[in-house]
Amino acid sequence: MSDPAPPDARATAVARVWAAMRVLVLEEEDRRKEVADTLGISFSRARALRRLLPGPLTMRELTARLSTEKPYTTLVVDDLEERGYVRRTVHPDDRRSKIVTLTDAGRAAAERADRILARPPRRLAALAPDDLAALDRILTGLFAAEP
């Protein structure tokens, strides 16, 4: 049985793996830019549309799901409403609250964004079957383990 790597070597390996994953997912094939370019809206607006795919949300719920401030969410929803992607209505039980709902055009845009974001990076798709199986096993284990 071998000794685990010294703390410095382990930290270096962790940083190297994370840097490679970050480049693979966020930089090499910039899907966020592709979504923005394809839809003609900022990625943050596309993200708002995607948060609405499961169903309507109040402005407060959308603000929480976007991790933004209320005024910014209002700007985003105003723009999406002007573009015909969402509809804002008064909450039936609380007239001070607004509900944001996707329109058909908004649902189509959100689904298109999801399809772009779901497409695996070319380098990942090009992995040899054994390497892909090993990576699948490792990632499955990461998510199965308690943090």
Image (cartoon, rainbow, N blue to C red):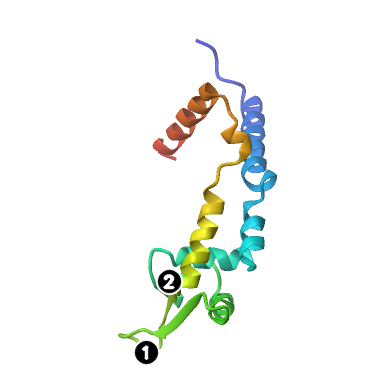
Q: Amino acid at mark 1?
A: Arg
Identify the residue at image location x=63%, y=68%.
Answer: 41
In this rendered view, identify the residue nearer to me: 13 or 40. 40
Q: On the rendered structure, is 1 left or right of 72?
A: left
Residue placed furthest toward the bottom: 95
Identify the residue at image location x=36%, y=84%.
Answer: 91
In this rendered view, identify the residue nearer to me: 120 or 144. 120
Q: What's the CA distance linking mark 2 and mark 1?
A: 16 Å
Q: Which mark is residue 123?
A: none
SS for callout 2: helix
Say whether residue 66 is visible: no
Asked if residue 9 is positioned above or below residue 2 in the image, the reply reads: below
Q: Position of residue 34 (x, y in %)?
A: 65, 56
Q: Amino acid at mark 2?
A: Glu
Q: Which residue in the protein does label 2 denote?
A: 61
Q: Position of residue 8 (x, y in %)?
A: 66, 28
Asked if residue 88 is positioned above or below residue 26 in the image, the reply reads: below
In this rendered view, identify the residue nearer to me: 83 or 11. 83
Q: Which residue in the protein does label 1 denote?
A: 95
Residue placed furthest toward the left: 93
Identify the residue at image location x=63%, y=33%.
Answer: 17
Q: How many marks?
A: 2
- Of label 2 and label 1, which has the lower sequence position? 2
Q: Position of residue 103 (x, y in %)?
A: 45, 75
Q: On the rendered structure, is 41 left or right of 146?
A: right
In which quadrant will I find the C terminus? top left
Q: Quadrant of residue 89?
A: bottom left
Identify the residue at image location x=40%, y=88%.
Answer: 96
In this rendered view, identify the residue nearer to me: 67 or 118. 118
Task: Kindly check if marks 2 and 1 are in contact, taking CB atoms under 8 A apart as contact.
Answer: no
Say whether residue 29 is visible: yes
